[in-house]
Image (cartoon, grey):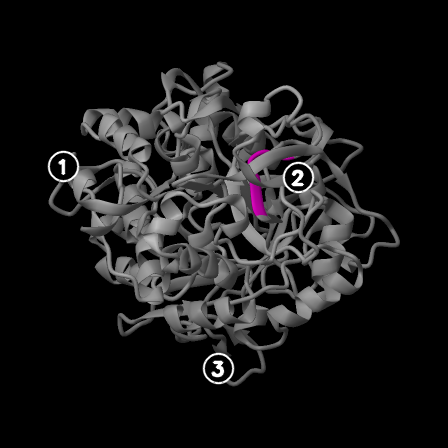
Amino acid sequence: MGLFLLDYGAGNVQSLANSLTKLGHSFQWISSPTDFQKATSLIFPGVGAFETAVENLTKKGLLEPLKEYVQSGKPYFGICIGMQILFQASEESPNFHGLGVVPTTIDRFDDSAKTVPHMGWNSADLVQSSDVEPAFYYFVHSYCAKYCPADRPDAASWAYTTTQYGGEIFISSVRRGNVFGTQFHPEKSGAAGLALIDNWLRTPEAERSASKPESLCSPPTLSLKPRDNLSKRIIACMDVRSDDDGNLIVTKGDQYDVREKVPSGHSMRVKTGGAVRNLGKPVTLASKYYAAGADEICLLNITSFRHSPLQDQPMLAVVRAAAECVFVPLTIGGGIKDTIDPDKTKRSALEVASEYFRAGADKVSIGSDAVYAAEKLLGSGQKHGDGTSSIETIAHTYGRQAVVVSIDPRRVYVDPTTYDGPHQDELILGSLDSAFESDRGRSWWYACTVSGGRETRSISVCQLARAVETLGAGEILVNSIDRDGTGLGFDSDLLRLIKGCVKVPVVASSGAGRKEHFLDVFEQTGVEAALAAGIFHRGEVDIGEVKECLAQHDIKVRTHIA
């Protein structure tokens, strides 16, 4: 008897388990249909695609017992897919039916004037009156329950909170009787989300079984009128690799070179070849940045190409430990591809990603393998992939919001008067009065690279961005080999180019040297997030200083931190 968690076999459910442990609540896992009868409270932290959730629940014989549990009147808390499955069906998977508890369907966001997925921190606004300021919660979804009181009055009556995104208002949480569900992820929403979970669990089960709207247990930090409060995200990134003694450390390169420079003979010149630059321990820094207000944490295993990720137990241990103390989204990158273990066992990219998700990751970042997949798609002449790439298989199982593609472009300088190559439409013309001397009077296009920037390919960043969006990427992380470690600011030309190519969120990376650079990139390019590493590791700029600078210039940021 007591609290049970439902894991249907996909997505990061470990984060909720970590949240409950931190809050001091004991729980058990649903392992068979009979466990529903033992549960007196149930949380379903579904993550991923609607089809995958319904299909897996059905295969395991859990779908009907779940419906019976919800109808029994015992407390139910559904998160993300755990809320969506309460509805009749989803446009994402028309051939699969939900529980039909809420009498309407889940529909896709309109992406004609905004990026989709809806990804980041937004406010949840009480349908009932309240005059308090909104708390920010973390959303990551492409499909939602539209809030239409005139056209869907029965469904609208279930709405506890609504949220606005790009002019569309959707139901961000439902509540009636024993049923509570959130579209956002409280387990990834810092202090506000942890408080919501704790308040629900500490309310007596009898009250949660038949609560009235005025006695609901969400924290009193929601507002009355829907406002589009999606904030810009500040992401702290850590490049993780082994030092020369085999210890996992956080490092940072200058144009991707992570070794300290050493004197070259008796001259004043320096060369690379020193020890790997050590900027701290991964979990310690992740915890520090979470406490400082980072909106997301990114861990990149930059030497994963040398071995099978599933054999890299120290890195998996780092992910598990970070997930136990970081309650904002955690992205893991490195080695997300089809691999072969030393014992010749074949491992698919989906297996690798699944292991990271089970360890506590929320998103996986795909690098070189995305380039190869894009080249294959472009070479085939087809409009869609064949379903076998790492992007497609992971997005199909976990939803495209779980897939980040990290691109590493470098500039290829050309003479615009003579260049007749395939990338003429993507040429950037450097202004003679550019703040960057190296840009003045020059022209270039951006070529993609693989293997950590060591190999340049003929595919351009625009070709890559469009192709990976087609294959199912939910977000694009844009690095810059030319700006990496320079402290000269983000490459706005590159970012504007990619923003014009895709409708998924774009994250700026490489080049930040001071807080004003974050303001510049948001004002000049419209990216949804900005990532930095070295300036945070070295203490040159604090995350709080960045957010204060942005807020002073009316850039929306999340101010409620851990």
Q: Helix, strand or loop at disc 1?
A: loop
Q: Which mark is residue 34?
A: 1
Q: Which mark is residue 265?
A: 3
Is-magenta flag for residue 117?
A: yes
Q: Which mark is residue 100?
A: none
Tell me the crowding category of disc 3: few under 14, some 14 to 19, or many 20 or more residues within 10 angstroms, Cα based.
few
**Image position of 300 (left or right of 411):** left
Question: Picture quarter containing residue 539?
Answer: bottom right
Q: Amino acid at mark 2?
A: Gln
* Number of numbered discs overlaid on the protein picture: 3
- 160 is higher (above) or lower (below) than 561: above
Tell me the crowding category of disc 2: few under 14, some 14 to 19, or many 20 or more residues within 10 angstroms, Cα based.
many
- Direction bottom: furthest residue: 266
For the point 50% across and 53% down, the residue is: 218
Give the residues drawn in magenta, as a range.
115-120
CA gap between label 3 and label 1 equals 73 Å
Residue 445 position in % (x across, y down): 67, 39
